[in-house]
Amino acid sequence: MRLVCQCFRLYVVDSVYNTLLSEMLTDFFDAELRHYVNYDRDF
């Protein structure tokens, strides 16, 4: 039973971490792209 809890906790932490990481990366690349390409001028 403890193993199941451990695996579940690892899975949750991993997915949360991946979600946060991908959101941060997306925001970062978004800002960088805007900075270099200046495509925010189209909006």
Image (cartoon, rainbow, N blue to C red):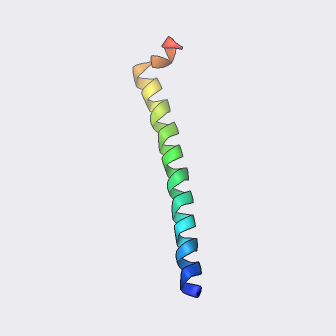
The C terminus appears in which quarter of the rendering?
top right
Q: Nearer the viewer, residue 2 or 30?
A: 2
Please give the name of the residue rendered at 57% of the width and 65% of the height, measured from the top-left corner: 12
Classify residue 17 by image quadrant. Answer: bottom right
Return the x and y of residue 39 as percentages of the image width and height.
45, 18
Q: Nearer the viewer, residue 28 or 17?
A: 17
Classify residue 5 by image quadrant. Answer: bottom right
Image vertical order of residue 18 relative to residue 2, above or below? above
Please give the name of the residue rendered at 48% of the width and 32% of the height, measured from the top-left corner: 30
Image vertical order of residue 32 relative to residue 1, above or below? above
How many labels sit on residues?
Answer: 0
Please give the name of the residue rendered at 54% of the width and 85% of the height, measured from the top-left corner: 3
The N terminus appears in which quarter of the rendering?
bottom right
Return the x and y of residue 2 as percentages of the image width and height.
59, 86
Q: Residue furthest bottom?
A: 1
Q: Nearer the viewer, residue 33 or 14?
A: 14
Image vertical order of residue 43 relative to residue 27, above or below? above
Image vertical order of residue 25 relative to residue 19, above or below? above
Q: Residue furthest left?
A: 37
Please give the name of the residue rendered at 45% of the width and 31% of the height, measured from the top-left corner: 32
Q: Residue furthest top?
A: 42
